Image (tube, rainbow, N blue to C red):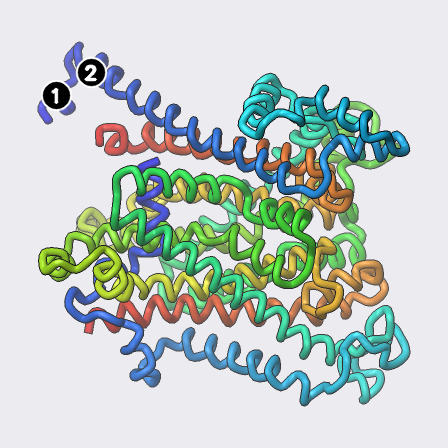
Amino acid sequence: MARTLSIDADAAPVARTRRRPYVLTRVLQMVPTLLLILLTAFVLLQLAPGDMVQVLAGEAGGGSPEYLARLRQSFGLDQPLHVQFLLYMRNVLSGNLGFSFRNNASVTALIGARLGPTLLLAAAGLAVAVGIGVSAGALAAARRGRPVDRLIGIAALLVYATPGFLLGIGLMLVFAVALPWLPVGGFVDAYGVEGPWAHALSVARHLVLPAVTLGALHAAIYARFTRGAMLEVYGQDHVRTARSKGLSAGRIALRHVLRNALLPLVTVIGMQTGALLSGAILVETVFAWPGLGRLAFEAMQQRDYNLLAGLILCSGTLVVLVNLAVDLLYAVLDPRVRLK
Amino acid sequence: MKTTEGIAVSAVARPHAPVLPAAAPRPGAKLWRGWAAWPLSLKIGTALLALQLAVALLAGWLYPGDPFDLAGPSFLPPGADPQFPLGTDIMGRDIAAGLVHGARVSLLVGLSATVIATVLGTTVGLLAGYFGGWVDHLLMRVTELFQVIPHFLFAIILVAIMGSQLPYIVLAIGVTSWTMVARLVRAETLALRERDYVKICQVMGGGHARVILTHILPNAFAPVIVAASVLTALAVLTEAGLAFLGMSDSNRISWGGMIGASREALLDAPYMTLIPGAAIVLAVAALSLIGDGLAQHLRRGGAS
């Protein structure tokens, strides 16, 4: 106790030695989860009808049983399952996620090409979600029980109840078809785009509708969460103290309530990453956004199991990493976590 | 991971977890008695859902015959012909008939997927919370796995592998959505395990099964009921999403399937998309209201 309060020279090393184990344990905790993701992808590939040798032979116009057996041997498919799993693990760890015969490209290359647009969409969607969600939730909490609060509650309910693709279609019909302000879909205009600034502007114009669609769904969740968290903080002693000091309601809401309520929001954002990627599948399909979600849709249509397994690996790992980042960020923001 | 768990639980469970009466098991029994005291959201939600269930049950009587029948001219807008109050779709199928029959499939998928998810999640949560130790550790790693893989992507892959018949769609949605229930039940079980009446039952020689089934499960079930209504809403949304991507049972009409089938006519005849879409919004909103209302009601019931 005394040590945490003191500001003498040896306080810093103490803090550092304490922080390192937290980071280390937290990183080590990821290992079993990552292994399980790998195992899941492997099992799904085993469950998928047909193996890649049949696909290969099929593309080549058939093959004799001996040829198929030789192919299986060359790919290690005649080995027992646990050996195959180790082979698969070795391949994945060396960056080889298999081959997509439908696209005639490696899964790694396909995912790599689509990762950027999805991260851009997810980041923009998250910004919209947090921006709208937190302000609406804060407003509702500050005006608890008043018409504004009710209105925000109803709006959040309706948006939450709308399937993502339907919201996207609705926005598209209004803002791209009826009022031709924004492009219907795609990533960048096909022609008339010269120079990096024009390119960025064109991408930004294409980004608006998908990002708003994806963000609106999550904004509803953040609004409800922010409202609930703020109402909880409103009941605490330090808020009463602030009130008794005669601070204005707005200052109390922003400085004393919202700041405390935002801390757990960081964790909620981490938990919603998977849902954000799930939502991106539908939103990218509606707006023809060339990201991982649309890639998943294409892979599903073509029954491209190698690609689907690669997408599971990639998105699962992404969520694990985001959660790690969120937990570490949380430890920085809230020292109580790492001292526990 | 500690923080994630703590928040995950508190975000959903906190409203009711601490106020469950210690010695008054079976909060479900209280639920039906005081329906006059239900919160407004619970009343509205239940009324809306009852209406939709009634329509679903009476579908065969309201619109006898196959909703896939080409009943009239195609692309008939709503209101143009009194025989087809909601118009017809690309193929000339009656949209009103599709809506009514689709209610059956959409609600059935939602409810059955929720049953699967609830049974799975409750089992995992009970075992993990009650036994603790390596059982808990193992089950929680598996739960984490199902949390980090995006649910919708997982469901898509399962349907792609199994096929898009209705039972497989239900299974895919159920299997990918149980984690929330597992975490809730685990948290409840961890708290209940330390209660005196549970310890007494153990001391009196009650076996694990007896303790779990008669002393822990009934008391851990209140938050599960709330979670189940949220899950049903999510399942209806997931079914619609799968159907929109073309993964629906082509022999059974559902709201999502109707939207998927009219995608090509989106710009010419948006009503084909918006009408079944409104049905989905109504169902999901009703279920969310029920979830909110139930949480509020159980919280209040515990306090009185």
Calculate the distance from the C-alpha at mark 1 to the C-alpha at mark 2.
9 Å
Query: Is A22 rendered above or below residue A158?
Result: above
The residue furthest front is A66
Residue placed at 18% from the left, 50% from the top? Answer: A237
| Element under disc 2 | helix
Quickly name the residue at label 2: A14
CB contact under 8 Å: marks 1 and 2: yes
Q: Quadrant of residue A306 in the image?
A: top right
Secondary structure beneath label 1: helix
Q: Earlier in the sequence, mark 1 or mark 2?
A: 1
Tags 1 and 2 on a common chain? yes
Labelled disc at residue A339 = none
Q: Provide the residue designation for mark 1.
A: A3
Q: Residue at x 83, y 26 (%)?
A: A194
Q: Is residue B127 left or right of residue A293?
A: left
Quadrant location of the C terminus of chain A?
Answer: top left
Instruction: Tell me, yes or no, if residue A137 can be seen here.
Output: yes
Give the left or right position of residue B58, taking residue B225 as reference: right
Q: Tell me what residue is drawn at x 63 percent, y 42 percent.
A: A47
Task: Identify which amino acid the numbered label 2 is placed on.
Answer: Val
